[in-house]
Image: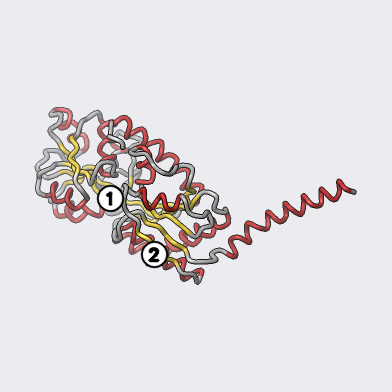
Amino acid sequence: MAARADVACFVAAVAACLAAAPAAAQVYPTRQIEIVVPFVAGGTTDNIARMLAQRFSDAWRETVIVSNRPGGGATIGTGVVAKAAPDGHTLLVTTLAFTTTPALQKLPYDAAKDFVPVTELASIPLVLVVHPSVPATTLGEFIALAKAEPARLDYVSAGAGTSTHLAAEMFNAAAGVKLVHVPFKGNAEGMNAILGGHVKVYFAQAAAVLQHVRAGTLRAIAVTTETRIATLPDVPTIAELGFPGYEISTWQGLFVPTGTPEAVIAKINAEAVAMLNTPEVRQRLSYEGADPVGSTPGQFTARVKAEFAKWSKVIREAGIATQ
């Protein structure tokens, strides 16, 4: 009888655990939700976070705020979420920097262990552009020029460790060239430098250079994504031109602290993906040069894991200084 009672208790406990997961999703959220953005207000990442806040608030009838916590190369705001209660009430919306920073500096958290990826929200392609004074119209001509006159071609970046920097260093390694790095304090300063012809090359966000490419003030050589982009359909990818595996885009992603119930993660993911599939949000993101994604937690986890490995290798082999 005692054994039967033990079995009955065990079955009851298992049933209670199985019922707890859906119940957690049903009652979530129970209080105000904070979406932390580890950058200053403004820009695509902040705008997406504010779209999410409105969507969650409307769907769940709960207050949702966006907190901009910039500083430390996005580590201050990210660290806040790492230490938050894993209950789905503190979320992180961040960028590719999440996977590059661990290889650039010591962190007060473990990016790979302290967070669960929920969904990739959007992706922004980069374009390799040159000033019209550069005598190259194809990637082959560009590489030949770089090899014939080493260190003649310099490239703009929005700062050390940014996507505009890493894209060029990954290209250096793949093509066997040595473009010279000229870092600036942001994309705006870098754009002014290449438009003025002071620096000749830029792996820039597509939206930032599209009008200049169409006007002929910059020349597009190739795009950095796996497939061609809709806004520049005649511009080939670097991968298709003989460098398979070369890919980089600036993405925005949604994360929660490790330990957050799976049912809560699923509920957050479903609402975020539904938002990304609405025509108005897709139009707003397209206007900013971003492509909506809306992946599953598993798909985004696989991407983030691959990004950690890729950028650690690029940063190490390029000898980019770490803190």
Q: How packed is label 2: few (under 14 Cα within 10 Å), some, or many (20 or more)? A: some
75 lies left or right of 256: left
Q: Nearer the viewer, residue 19 or 205?
A: 19
Residue 153's disc is none
For mark 1, give the secondary structure: loop
Viewer-side label of 1, 2? 2
190 lies left or right of 288: left
Furthest residue in direction right, as rendered: 1
- Give the residue at mark 1: 233
Residue located 32% across and 54% down the image: 70
- Give percent across and percent down for residue 103: 36, 37
55 lies left or right of 202: right
- Give percent across and percent down for residue 252: 37, 52
Q: Nearer the viewer, residue 135 or 166?
A: 166
- Give the residue at mark 2: 51
- Give percent across and percent down for residue 90: 47, 58
- Give percent across and percent down for residue 36: 40, 57
Q: Amino acid at mark 1?
A: Pro
Of pointers 1 and 2, the one earlier in the residue sequence: 2
Q: Which quarter of the picture shows residue 182?
A: top left
Q: Amino acid at mark 2?
A: Met
